[in-house]
Amino acid sequence: MSIENPRPGDPLDQIRGLHLPEEIGFWPPAIGWWLTAGLILLVVVGTGILILARRRSLRFRALRELEDLKTRWSSDSDFQTMAAEVSMLLRRIALKRYGHETVAGLYGEHWQEFLSRTGERRSEEAWDPDIGRILALAPYAPPGPGNTWSPLSREYLLQKAEHWIEVNS
């Protein structure tokens, strides 16, 4: 006896078995990944622009204040007081740029070493140790004529201060 299909022409016999859909490929990513990548790119570019604008703003304000010092202190004025004001300007910039913990306690030789170390960065022009000595000692010296300070010229001091500001702000 042979076993035959009890129901000839059964429509269920014509149905294929279960089949899986095609695998999802890596490319192109879904819209959510595009939006996430765009958001990350926007945040990175925006942060870079804000940091650059803040640094340029600090540089712009510092150089403008140095120009005010140049015009206020003519060549016949007190060199020591001008050097003290330049030193205070550089200290304010250093506090803003390097933080209170790093800069606030520096004075004398330590302030001079800090100015030398940070003044030479990213530059071919070396920081003059005599300028650092003048800027380190000027705020603590009694006011008086600048003849005892240094044979360096007022313009040279201001030029080096401007260079330090450009490098560090």
Image (cartoon, rainbow, N blue to C red):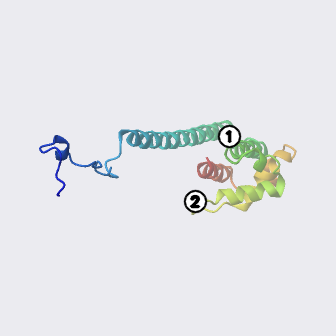
Residue 111 screen position, x and y as percent: 78, 54
Element type at marker 2?
A: loop
Compare residues 144 and 43 and report the one nearer the observer: 43
Label for residue 5? none
Residue 12 falls in which quadrant of the image? top left
Q: Is residue 97 left or right of residue 6?
A: right
Q: Nearer the viewer, mark 2 or mark 1?
A: 2
Residue 129 screen position, x and y as percent: 73, 61
- Asked if residue 157 can be seen in this view, the reply is yes
- Residue at numbered disc 1: 74
Q: Which residue is pictured at 81% across the width and 57% down the height? A: 110
- Asked if residue 151 can be seen in this view, the reply is no
Element type at marker 1?
A: loop
Q: Is residue 84 left or right of residue 69?
A: right
Residue extending furthest toward the front: 1
Q: Which amino acid, by three-letter code, is at mark 1?
A: Ser
Residue 131 falls in which quadrant of the image? bottom right
Q: Is residue 26 left or right of residue 169?
A: left
Q: Earlier in the sequence, mark 2 or mark 1?
A: 1
Q: Residues within 10 Å of mark 2 (few under 14, many from 20)?
A: few
Q: Which amino acid, by three-letter code, is at mark 2?
A: Arg
Above-or-below relation of 109 to 74? below
Residue 101 screen position, x and y as percent: 78, 47
Question: From the image, which quarter does the N terminus lie in?
Answer: bottom left
Number of marks in the rendered image: 2
Label for residue 122? 2
Instruction: Give me the C-alpha separation between circle 2 and circle 1.
Output: 31 Å
Residue extending furthest toward the left: 9
Q: Which residue is pictured at 70% across the width and 48% down the height? A: 98
Compare residues 53 and 166 and report the one nearer the observer: 53
